Amino acid sequence: MKTNNIEGLTMFEINVLIQQGAKFVAFPFIFSKMVKRIKQSNIYFIRPNESTFKFALKHFYLNLSTGWRIFPYGPIYVVKSLFYLIKGGKDYTDAILIDLNTNKSIYNPH
């Protein structure tokens, strides 16, 4: 999964923003290719004073337009995406921080 909105930020800046209230959230969506259904989730870094509504609404419309075609689970996933729209996304901050801290590279100014 790709993490969006962290371009140009160092690990220190990410940790400072998280202490100020930032978080990593995901908005699940589903689409179909013929008979196969594919569930995906984009992860976004939400800054302390930023709203999650613009990200959640895009994924809800994607679910609404493609999710109903997948029967019987499509309507369930559309309702689930509406739940995450209202909730503000599924919080993955702890899991992403553990992954970033274990995979961080050594700082080399040259």
Image (cartoon, rainbow, N blue to C red):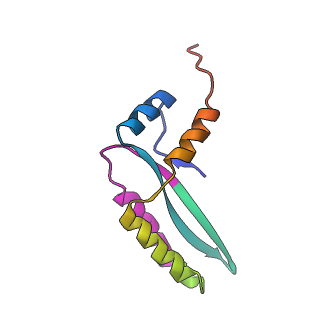
- What is the quadrant of residue 17 in the picture? top left
- Report the residue at 52% width, 80% height from top: 76
Residue 33 percent across, percent down from the top left: 66, 75
Taking 100 as reference, is 12 above or below it? above
- What is the quadrant of residue 20 in the picture? top left
As drawn, which residue projects farthest toward the bottom?
72
Q: Is residue 107 magenta?
A: no
Residue closest to the eye, 54 or 19: 19
Q: Is residue 62 magenta?
A: yes
Residue 100 percent across, percent down from the top left: 58, 37
As drawn, which residue projects farthest toward the top?
110
- Report the residue at 35% width, 60% height from top: 53
Q: Which residues are magenta?
A: 43-65
- Report the residue at 48% width, 40% height from top: 6
Residue 104 percent across, percent down from the top left: 61, 30
- Report the residue at 60% width, 86% height from top: 71
Check the picture and name the quadrant holding the C terminus. Answer: top right
As drawn, which residue projects farthest toward the left?
49
Work out whether residue 57 can be spotted. no
Residue closest to the eye, 56 or 87: 87
Residue 89 percent across, percent down from the top left: 44, 59
| Total residue callouts | 0
Residue closest to the eye, 13 or 34: 13
Work out whether residue 11 can be spotted. yes
